[in-house]
Amino acid sequence: MTGAGIELVETSGVFALDGGTWEVSNNIWLIGDDREVLIVDASHEAGPIVEAVGDRDVIAIVCTHAHNDHITVAPELAAHYGAPIRLHPADRPLWDSSHPGEKYAPLTDGERIVVAGVEVRVIHTAGHSPGSVCLHAPQLDSLFSGDTLFSGGPGATGRSLSDFPTIIDSIRSRLLPLPPDTVVRPGHGACTTIGAEAPHLGEWIARGY
Ligand SMILES: [Fe+2]
């Protein structure tokens, strides 16, 4: 790869919350070039991620939020690469329920992380969880949306520490103003664009999810 680009790794496993379990497939995004990468989410198993990274330097493992299916192997990857785990501190209770005692470096809203010459801006988008974040990479026309925005609407808000009015506020005020051709790359499933989703905000509010 010449210049910075984006790669997708998919892994599958179990999402567990509130005493329930669900089989899920997750998207792990790598942002970088031939030399260095940023890992976005650390789902289920390290092997496929390590294989995709190859011999490149890992500058950080950014977790879009701390549901177990997005952070499963974050400590394992951090130890393997000697790289920091980055997570918004509002998700501390969720983090502690998966990885008690494991350290992470707090993410800040508006923070900019540079990888392979590309700037990645942290956007705090509470709602799916209190510390959910999206990462906007304008030079790559991409938004890494975690479980905040999918093709077809907002992420789930029916379980503990989620809130529907809050996720709607986050999407309306922080995400929909982005350029319409921004590719939305979520934590599960297919990509979409800001322009494809924006017209449906009113429907989501009316249906309540
Ligand atoms: Fe989630």
Image (cartoon, rainbow, N blue to C red):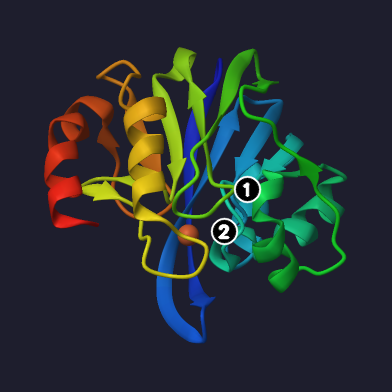
- Quarter of the C terminus within the rendering: bottom left
Residue at 35% in and 48% down: 165
- Quarter of the N terminus within the rendering: top right
Task: Give the quadrant of residue 82.
Answer: top right
The residue type indicated by label 1 comes to Cys
Label 2 sits on a secondary structure element that is: helix
Left/right placement of residue 52 relative to residue 114 reads left
| Residue 64 x, y percent position in the rendering | 56, 46
Decide: is 172 above or below 28: above
The residue type indicated by label 2 comes to His
Residue of label 1: 63
Residue of label 2: 70
Residue at 50% in and 69% down: 160
| Residue 66 x, y percent position in the rendering | 61, 58
Left/right placement of residue 65 relative to residue 184 reads right
Decide: is 179 above or below 176: above
Decide: is 107 above or below 14: above
